[in-house]
Amino acid sequence: MSKPVSFFDKPNSYIGRAVTRPNAKRLVEGRGRYVDDMTLPRMLHAAFVRSPYAHARIKSVDVSQASQAPGVIAAYDGVEIAKHITPWVGVLSHLKGLRSAPQPALAVDVARWQGEPVAMIVASSRAEAEDAAMLVEIDYEPLPEACDMEKALDKDTPVIHDEFDSNLCWERVVEAGDVDACFNDPDVTVVERTLHFGRHTGVTLEARCLIAEYDPSDDYLTIHYSGQSPHMMQAILAKHLDMREENIRFVARDVGGSFGIKIHTYGDEFAVAAVAKLLRRPIKFVADRFESFQSDIHARDHRVWGRMAVTKEGKITALEIDDLTGIGPYSVYPRSSAIECNQVLNLTGAPYDLQAYRARGRVVFQNKNVMCQYRAVGHPVAMAVGEALVDDAADAINMDPADLRARNVVPDDAYPYTSCSGMRYADLSHEQCHKKLLELMDYEGLRKQQEEGRAQGIYRGIGLASMVEVTNPGPLFYGAGGAPVSAQDGVTVRLDPAGALHVAASITEQGQGAETILAQIVADAVGVDMDRIKISTGDTLTSPYGGGTWASRATGIGGEAALLSGQALKAQILEVAATILQAKAGDLDIQDNAVVDVKTNARRIELSDLARTVYYRGNELPNESLPELIATRHFRVTDYPFVFTNGAMASYLEVDVETGLIKLLGHWVVEDCGRVINPMLVDEQIRGGVVQGIGGALFEQCIYSDDGQLLTATMADYLVPMAFEMPDIEVAHVETPTSTSVLGAKGAGEAGTGGAPAAIFNAVNDALKPLGAEKISAQPITPERVLKALGLV
């Protein structure tokens, strides 16, 4: 019996097609609409004086000389700025015990990290503002630093905030099952390891930037910004500027990359908004690359001890971890800096069917730049820890690591399934993904090739990783904790008189192809060609209310809203068509921009003719007919707190044992992100994520001196993976649509970043295994660390 045809299987459907981005031509021609491209009348420019100390008392700030410099309009210190914008506290009520001190826009009394803004100069040009910034005189009294996160809780370490008794920000313990009994079982083998993960940051192609423009006649503030969540920013800026929310407009047009960096509150940006209101002139601020390294949020920086119990038959019974992470001096507002640690506790060992699990997480304050969410929040740490221990367990019982994974992943027929950490999973496919991965990469063939190479003194390694990714978060993720972050997204679809569709969406375009996905879904839902669809996103004045783009939610939540609104508009069109054509709506359909007969596909009326009749010649319609050719729908996930994506990855690489250099030879990904809307976009998102994962695994690190000085503040010092270092990245899919929506789409934007470091970790250690090397347990895996593992340095 043949499979019934679903909505998504209809002929010429855009769903599942590799459609080229409609905005590609505009972007490659250099016609993108980025913030720094804008110049407004009477616009001024802002520059900031930043603390050179990791921890120092600010005894005085003298801006008098700077105020008299050429081109300077105004100069401010933190005390003056604090009169116009209130401080914020980055805590969430559902993370019990989370605490943070009030954070001002500019430092007041004490500077708590090197790079924290202390004074602000506003001038006619950026160059004049920077020149004047050098004239600001600040008297600092250096204070003892608390920079080492592993010593942050020691009694002799300075407490960063006087109102607290320690540098502890948050602590959580998870325990399920009889952990001690599992580890004390004489029939199990226990492996343990401590892993370290370095700090790194997003390095977005377009730096943080905004233009704030205030209209005093309406008490109206417009912010053009490069960011991810316009409605969230509108809410929190209104609160701290003491303005009505409806009197602030955020506009995010083209955004040159975000990766989570641009979803947080930054003091320099909020200070610009406050001063624009004071001066009643537009003010632009664009962070240069040096400022970005100092002030863009950092991420990772974890020390995780873990152990795993496994029987001689290959059954993993228990897992225990202890995670310590430093977050800088404040929990970042409004999403908090405890979320990454929380994700590590929730997701470590997630692919596996465990009997018992224990995890402790501690988040500590330190005198370094603030840390918060960055692409694949917590996932690279959680997956690397769990997968490293799986490989260790396989070594301990002399079992192939692929076989051990196959025996322990949660079976595909076990869902819905609740993990030991309390996560509710549904619609996952670990078994299928693992099997498909081994076939895709020719696992047995690579093992044979590896053995042949070792005989010739060539040391290659194979690393595997099974993974879980949080996507499509529901209201319990942030809303329950009090942050003004919407779990829903909205889409409005309007039929214009010419027969075109205008789509306004609350999700934002950051280069990931959101506009393309929206156009595909609406074109499919209504029955029009994609080239008759115009998309607008990221404007709080014109788009429906929504959460924006983060946590791989744009397609799964925004796309579902697009589908629902498109279907609603189609129903409206067919109802009007039935009236005009004196037919039944059920006998009509829309194909190729026209209303057609369902049985014969004969074209009955063009959408342009129908729309003109409604808009221009309403006299031709019955008096009781009041057609609407516009529909808005919102969607949020209601059945689960998250929709999880899963997948499996493998890395194949070669280690030069004389230099410690690592050459990536191949990388494979099998991903189950539910229904694939555009295979080309999904695969490129996964490849891009893998590249960022490679960066964290091998290259990227924000390195500080012992006294809190950032030593990697330029692209000459902070390494990112380039084309030369990249292997071929082959992507395949298993499609298990999520049951939480009609569209069935999960997220895929962070999967590569979450899983790649784990696979690379294991591959490097696998390559060095025959040499009796010490297990490498720190990222990034530098040549120096390789040589140390080999005992050569």
Image: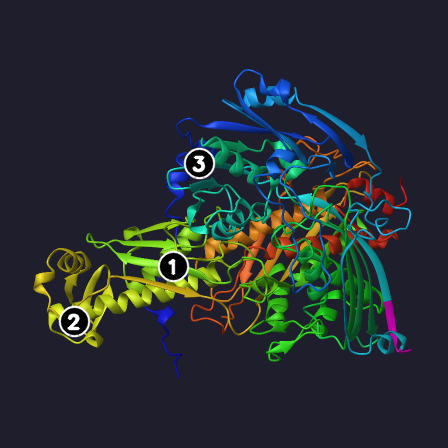
Nearer the camera: disc 1 or disc 3: 3
**583 inside magenta stretch:** no
Say the numbered circle drawn on residue 578. Answer: 2
Which residue lies under the disc numbered 3?
213
Is 706 or 104 nearer to us in this picture?
104
The residue sitting at 61% across, 32% down in the picture is 289
Q: Residue furthest bottom?
A: 1
The answer to whether residue 191 is left or right of residue 348 is: right
Residue 590 visible in the current orientation? yes
Q: From the viewer's perspective, is 199 left or right of 37? A: right
Q: Amino acid at mark 1?
A: Val
* Upstream in sequence: badge 1 or badge 2: 1
Residue 15 visible to the viewer: no
| Quarter of the N terminus within the rendering | bottom left
- Name which of mark 3 and mark 2 comes first in the sequence: 3
Q: Residues within 10 Å of mark 3 (few under 14, many from 20)?
A: many
Residue drawn at x 37%, y 49% is 536
User: Which amino acid is tagged 3?
Assistant: Glu
Q: Which residue is mark 1?
A: 491
Give the CA separation, mark 1 to mark 3.
Answer: 27 Å
Mark 1–mark 3 contact, CB under 8 Å? Answer: no
Residue 558: x and y, percent? 44, 60
For label 1, count other residues whose C-alpha is less than 10 Å away and answer few (under 14), some (14-19) or many (20+): many
Q: CA distance from mark 1 to mark 2?
A: 26 Å
Of tags 3 and 2, the one toward the viewer is 3
* Image depth: mark 1 or mark 2 in front: 1
**Residue span colored magenta:** 185-190
